[in-house]
Amino acid sequence: AQAIIFALMDRSESELGEPLTRLLPLGLGLLYLGKQESVEATAEVSKTLDEKIRKYCEITLLSCAYAGTGNVLKVQNLLGHCSQKDEMHQGPAVVGIAMVAMAEELGIDMAIRSLEHLLQYGEQSVRRAVPLALGLLSISNPKVKSML
């Protein structure tokens, strides 16, 4: 984790805008997959990163750390990020909603309703991520409702 953080800190502003740089926060998030509170120290360190990648890294870390927990507060937090106007971090927030909510059937149903609203009223960057999030919610339990 420390090596990835240092790699993100060493990147110039132009390098942080490249699409492949977004794989570094994803790798960092996967290190904390399902570990919940143990991500807090790394999340605090990620707040020192450049503004261009800070929110993206923070949302990816929290989404991966709370994946499969059904934590309603984290889902509400991610929904709040979807309503903001910054395009770079909205996609991971949408996918994060699905990752956190996929633990239980009731959470999946609530997330599908939220994603339907995002699909109707969200910005384009949000609408692009909704099909992936719907796919994650029904990965081993296909639903006709989400295929329509």
Image (cartoon, helix red, strand yellow):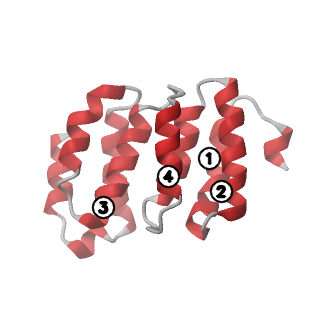
Q: What residue is rendered at 84% in x and 42% in y?
A: 145
Mark carried by residue 80: 4
x and y, in percent, of residue 31 in the image? 32, 34
Q: Is residue 119 left or right of residue 57?
A: right
Q: CA distance from mark 3 to mark 2?
A: 23 Å
Mark whose residue sits in front, 4 or 3: 4
What residue type is disc 4 on? Gly
Q: Earlier in the sequence, mark 4 or mark 2?
A: 4
Circles 2 and 1, Cβ within 8 Å, touching? The answer is no
Where disc 2 sits, the SS reads helix
Where disc 4 sits, the SS reads helix
Q: Earlier in the sequence, mark 3 or mark 2?
A: 3
Where disc 3 sits, the SS reads helix
Q: Which residue is mark 2?
A: 118
Mark carried by residue 10: none
Where disc 1 sits, the SS reads helix
What residue type is disc 3 on? Ile
Image position of 98 with respect to 120: above or below? above
Q: Earlier in the sequence, mark 3 or mark 1?
A: 3
Q: Which residue is mark 3?
A: 53
Instruction: Decide if residue 139 is in sight here.
Output: no
Q: Earlier in the sequence, mark 2 or mark 1?
A: 2
